[in-house]
Amino acid sequence: SQASDADIPAAVDKPLKIAAIMEFSTGTFASQYVSGLEAQVAKFGGEVQIYNANNDLSQMANHLQTAINQDVDGILIDHGRAEALNQGVEEALEKGIPVVTFDNDITVDGVTAISQDDYSLAWGTLKQLAQDIDGEGNIVYVWAGGFTPLERRNVIYEAFLEHYPNVEEIARFGSVSNNTALDSQNQMEAVLKKYPEEGSIDAVFAPYDEFAKGVTRAIQQAGRDEIKVYGIDLSDEDLQIMQAENSPWVTTAATDPAEVAGVQVRFLYQKIAGEETPSIYALDPSVVNVSDLPDESVTMADVGQHIEGWGSPNAARSPWMDALEAKNGQ
Ligand code: SR1
């Protein structure tokens, strides 16, 4: 076949050792992302070692250093901040180890940085929120600074408030921890106690699914289903929560985290193969409204049947990749 005839570059035609340096691995986004990394690297016949820094940026920098010292063939970085990682990234490149980043602000020449287009994610869900409340109402914002995707989503949130002067933020909270969903639930419970009257809160903007899960539980437990939740991200668990009867969580904007990981791995293999890769690449997110889904339960595997444009399976795919996957029995 044409696929198996494509010349596989010698540099990738062997079991490569890949390091994935992650800021944190809690939550359904991170677990789907890790599965996606493992699946794509395995398809290419390689091995990926996951380094999880448990939200500690200096530990993340140490992990990066360990991977460099181990002479891995390529490095993937997930989250983290430039100030903690720039030096290590420069060292990796000097040693000839290619680097592809996701969800951080590193801008070192030679690195490919991918994102989910956080600006579109935020605008997609906020536009729906604005339309649903007819441009007027009281909202709660869940947010934590210091995380590149959340910083980018916040830029759009600020623009949203300017664009809709009759929308008022009446409360804001948020933290990212080892149990973000539970923390968000507790913080939302306090807000609901402060605003007990029906109609005092119209909507919550929760631009991370761990925030949205916690907030949704608090609203349900307080019997305040009139408050609608607008989130970001999607997983099987999120779909189940959103599709539950009268769920407050009505809209999310998302890409498929496994596909994000697949694109990141493929760019890394392209770099190892000596191919040109772009400096930046943003996946195209989709807006998912519960009203667009059927009554029966939907999983991540079949979201694409209901949401137009879901997934971008051919991004960063070179012709030889089919042959490499076929050779490794995938
Ligand atoms: C704390 S940052 C959380 C975000 O990282 C990924 O970009 C996911 O979309 C998630 O919302």
Image (tube, rainbow, N blue to C red):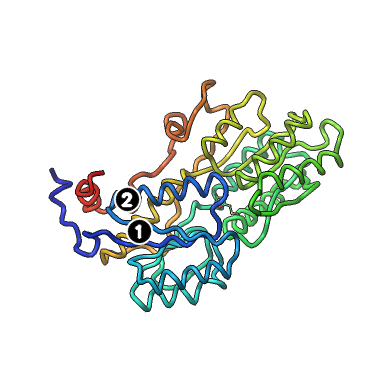
The circle on residue 42 is 2
Residue drawn at the location 42% of the way across and 29% of the way down? 305
| 326 left or right, relative to 197 | left
Residue drawn at the location 45% of the way across and 54% of the way down? 282
Residue drawn at the location 26% of the way across and 54% of the way down? 318
Asked if the beta carbon under badge 1 is closer than 8 A to the nearest atom of ligand 1, the reply is no
Is residue 248 shown above or below 277? above
Kind of residue indicated by mark 1: Phe
Residue 280 image-quadrant placement: bottom left
Asked if the beta carbon under badge 2 is closer than 8 A to the nearest atom of ligand 1, the reply is no
Q: Quadrant of the N terminus?
A: top left
Residue 268 position in % (x across, y down):
35, 61
Residue 16 image-quadrant placement: bottom left
Is tag 2's residue or tag 1's residue first in the polypeptide sequence? 2
Is residue 75 shown above or below 44? below
> Of circles 2 and 1, which is in front?
2
- The residue wearing badge 1 is 267
Residue sitting farthest toward the top: 295
| 86 left or right, relative to 135 | left
**SS for callout 1:** helix
Kind of residue indicated by mark 2: Ala
- Judging depth in this view, the residue of 215 and 19 nearest the camera is 19
Question: Distance of mark 2 from mark 1, alpha carbons?
Answer: 15 Å
Q: Badge 2, how many Cα within 10 Å: few under 14, some, many 20+?
A: some
Residue drawn at the location 79% of the way across and 37% of the way down? 201
Residue 281 position in % (x across, y down):
42, 57
Residue 165 position in % (x across, y down):
75, 47
- Judging depth in this view, the residue of 263 and 330 nearest the camera is 330
| 113 left or right, relative to 216 | left
The circle on residue 111 is none
Residue 241 position in % (x across, y down):
61, 32
